[in-house]
Every structure is written in C-alpha cells, then in structure tokens.
Amino acid sequence: MMAQARLAYIIAVRRIISGWGLELILFLGMLMAVALLSSAVIFSNLLAEAALRHALSEATPEQANFWVRVFSGQDAPPTTEGRNSLYKYTLDFAEDRIAARVKPHLRDQGRFFETSTFFFTGHPLLELDNEVRPRGEIKYVAGLTPERMEVVQGRWPQIVNPGAPLSPSNPLEVALDILGAELLQLGPGDEMGAFPAASFTDPESIPVKVVGVFRRTDPDDEFWYGAERTFSYKNDQWTIVPLFTTEEVILKQIFPVYPSLYTDTTWFYYLDRNSVRAAQVDDLLNSLRSIKYDVRANLNNSSSRIRLDGLLEDYKEQLLLAQIPLFLILFLMIGILTYYLALITGLVVKSRAAEIAMLKSRGATTGQVGSLALAEGLLLATPAVILGPLLAMGVVKLLGKVFFGLGGGGNLSTVPVELSSSAFLLGLAGGVLGVIVLTASTLFAARQGIVEFRQMGARPPKTPFIHRYYLDIVFLALIGLFLWQIKSQGSFLVRPLGSQGLELDWSHLLIPLLLLLAIGLLVMRLFPMVVGVLARLAETVGPSWLVHGLRHVSRDPIVPGALVVLLMLATA
C-alpha cells in the first residue's frame, strides 16, 4: 500500500509539472471553490457581528439594561435580625442567581436600597399639612463613586457609634443632593427629626443630621437610567427630598427602631454592549429567560423588567432575513463550482484519455488509475485549502470596510473579521469537492481500455447518454414537480409548531439552483439543434471552414455547450 501511494505521488507530481497549464487552471478552480465557500461563512459571521453591534448600539438604556426589584413588607420578619437575614438572602440571590448568569456581559451593576417615606420635623418649613409637607425616603445607592458624584459641602455620612442607639448625641447622618438642600433650606450641620409617614401609629421620631451636600457629575449617565425619582424633585403635589446615607446606617440604626419598616431593593444591571458576540446570543437569551423564571418563582415580592431578550430575538429574526440572500448565493456557488470543476476536470481527463487507456492495457486496475487521480487531487487541494480561507478573510475584510463605510456605518467598519473553524471546514469541503470530482471523472474515463479508446477515436462522437435516452426531459419534469411543491409551501421562513421564532425553510434556497439547472439542460438540448440550423444557413453564404466548424460542433456539442452553460451560470 505504501509503495503504491509513493508511486502515485511521484506520477502525480510529474503530471502536474508536465501539464502545468491545465493543472494551474484546475488548482485555481479548487482555490476559488475553497475561498468562495470560506468567504460565505466569514461574511455571514461578519454580518451577524455587525448587525448585533448595530442593534445594541442603537438600543435605548431601557432595552439594553434591566432591573430586578424586591419589596419587603408586612410579611418580612419584624425583628432586626430577621430583616438583616432577609436582606442578606436577597443580596446572595441577586449575586448568585442573577448577576452570575450574565456577568461576562455586564459593564457595571447598581443597587438602590431605600425605605418607605418619612416625614420631617424640627423646622416650620417641614411641619406643614401632611398633604403638602416635604417628605422622602432614606436611601443607600451602591455605585456612588467619585466618578459619579461630587460632595460640594461637608462630607459623606458614616456611622459613628454602631452599637449605640440613635439619640440627639448620636444622630442619623445623611447627605442631601443640591436640589434637596435648597427645598429644605438645610445644609451641613443642620439637624431635624424624621418619622415614617405610614404603617405606624404614633411612630417615634429619630434625630437626623445633615453632614453633606452632593451633586451628580453627569445626570445623563446611563447608570441613572430608571432612577428618575431617586433624587429630589418637586411637582404640583409633592416635594420629595431623599436622605442619602450608608447601607450600614439603615441596617444597624434604622431597623432597630423600625423593624417592620417597608423597604425596596432594586438591582440595576448594565450591559457591556461590546462584549456580546453573535455566537453568544443564544446563551445570553437562555440566561435571561432563567433569570425571569427564577425571580418570579423563587424571590418573594419581586418584580423585574427585562427587555433585552426581546431586542435579541428581534435581532435574530432580522439577521435571518438578511442572511437569506447570502444563503441563496452560497447554494448557487456550490452548484456553479461543482459544474466548473466537473468541466475543468473533464478537459484534464480528456487530455489524458490516451494515457489512461495505456495504463489499463498494461494491467492497471480502475482503482489504481483512480488512486493516481486522488493523489493528484490531494496535491492540488492541500495548498488550496490552506490559502483559500486566508484569501477569503482578506477579501471579506476589504469588502466589509468598503460596504459599511459607503453605507454610513463607519463604526461598523471596525467589526473584527475572524477566521472561524466553520470557515476552514467549509473551505475544506470545497477542496474535497474538487478532489472528488477529479477522481470520479478519472474513474469514469478508466472504464475503457486501449481498444475502446481507439474505436472512439476512429468513429464519429456518439450522442450523449443523457440525450440518447431523453434523461434531460425526465430531469426537467422532476425539477418542475419539485419547484411546484416548494412554491406551494409559501415563504422562505416558517414557524415550527411549538416555537415562537422563525426558521429558514432550506428547500426554498434550492429554487434558483434548480432553475439554473433546468435552463442548463434546455441549453444542452437545444444548442446542437441551433448550431445545426446555423450550419445549414451558412452552406450557401459562408466559407467552408465556418460550415465544417458548425457541423462539427453540432455533432459533438458537449465541450462548447458546456462552456455556454458555464458562461450562463457565471452571469447568473
């Protein structure tokens, strides 16, 4: 076996060197097959990445980000230890069963922990009628970093004596935003009282001391999406001034005084719009669905708002629509490349018909002749498989920059073009296709020996097998029936039973290829007839070389007819 393989390799190398002209054309055909098939995958991936980046970059904060809220009410444990334990459980739930599922795609997280509304006392402006008096929640905001807020007066609150109860000498330290300080007319060092506005009968008032005034550095930062009512505001009905403090103050100073106080905890999750790749969309969708179900089923008094899954579903549907022309071209390319390779290998094998017949006459089996073609095909296909995907990546990268730039999507021209394993595999399929076509053509020609070869050279060419038995008419009828069945199904897209998404009906992608195949069969059937008519017309007015040439083509129309069909397919 090794000796036969070595001999096949030596003969294949000598064949390639001696007939380098046809071999070069065959190699270019294989290279084109590999490059075109690889480029289909690469461009499909580029299209998916560009569409995803566009969808995420154009998404509003409400579409790209999401939040989960937990309300602690009367069913919460009415003790300090119980409230702290419940709060810790919700924190662990949010970290382990929400954030952990989407952490690779998160740019940032925020947490807003707030109590129910408090009334204020201690100043005439604060002690108006309950309908109009200022009020506000006590809040903790995780993420109020120096990049997002600036303390313009005083300092940030802290807990001075964690174990001591609230008293005039140990007041609750809070900070106000600039508008809140103006509405209450208070600043650092001023003190007041506060008590719950509802759910308590004659509640105890706690001492509050303003220790700082701050402002947000960028109120339009996406971090503040969904937090429009988190800061001070005034309308025709209410004057709302939140009191900002630390998480420790609420847990260790507020809960001991009001253990049954209502609280809200809201987690905000901010998507890193550049971290999501097209191949990760399905996993991200599954994670979002799991979060929705888990929050609804296992987190009491909870709610959530997640619109990112809808955005990604729309992206997948639009991408599928955009990929239909690409898939159509891919199917056409496969058909045309197969035909082109068959034509080129047919010419190569025809030029070697005498050599093949001689090998058969000297005892070579059909399998041994086929092994020579296999070795030759592998020698040509190996560099094509290596160079084809690289060539495809360069072409796609260039076309991506040009098309996205002309389309006004300058930011999309920077979408990375990657050479995936799928591109290599499809390119490998193109190389294997070339090897199979070359080997099959050689095996078909190896059926005849030296006697049959000389008989064929001494006799006029026979009518092609497919025309002799009118198989092309049978194929045309079958193609027409198949096209009728496909068209009766309707659209390219179908919605399978039990699924809410659309899927591509791959059978519809065969329509252009089948139409071209049908036209090619008609051309091959009508071409010799048309040439024969032209030969008769040229007998009276044309030169003899033209008449003899047309007659020869009409009697042996395979090669020129195949070139006509190839030109037609390439134009299509």
Image: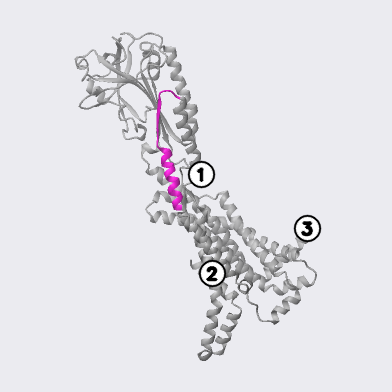
Give the colouring mode of the picture: one colour
- Residue type at mark 3 is Met
Between marks 1 and 3 in the image, the one whose residue lies nearer the viewer: 1
Task: List x then y, in percent, for residue 428.
Answer: 61, 55
On-image quarter of the N terminus: bottom right
Which corner quadrant of the image does residue 36 belong to? bottom right
> Mark 1 against mark 2, which lies toward the viewer?
2
Callout 3 secondary element:
helix
Mark 1: amino acid: Ala
Mark 3, Cα crowd under 10 Å, few <14 / some 14-19 / many 20+, is few
Residue 190 appearing in the image = no
| Residue 310 in magenta stretch | yes
Query: Which secondary structure, mark 2?
Result: helix
Residue 228: x and y in percent read 30, 30
Residue 235 at x, y = what percent?
Answer: 22, 27
Q: What stretch is highlighted in magenta?
A: 299-322
Circle 3 is placed at which residue position? Answer: 2
Q: Measured along the vertical axis of the image, is residue 79 above or below residue 488?
A: above
The residue that disc 2 covers is 520
- Disc 1: which residue: 279
Camera-side mark, 3 or 2: 2
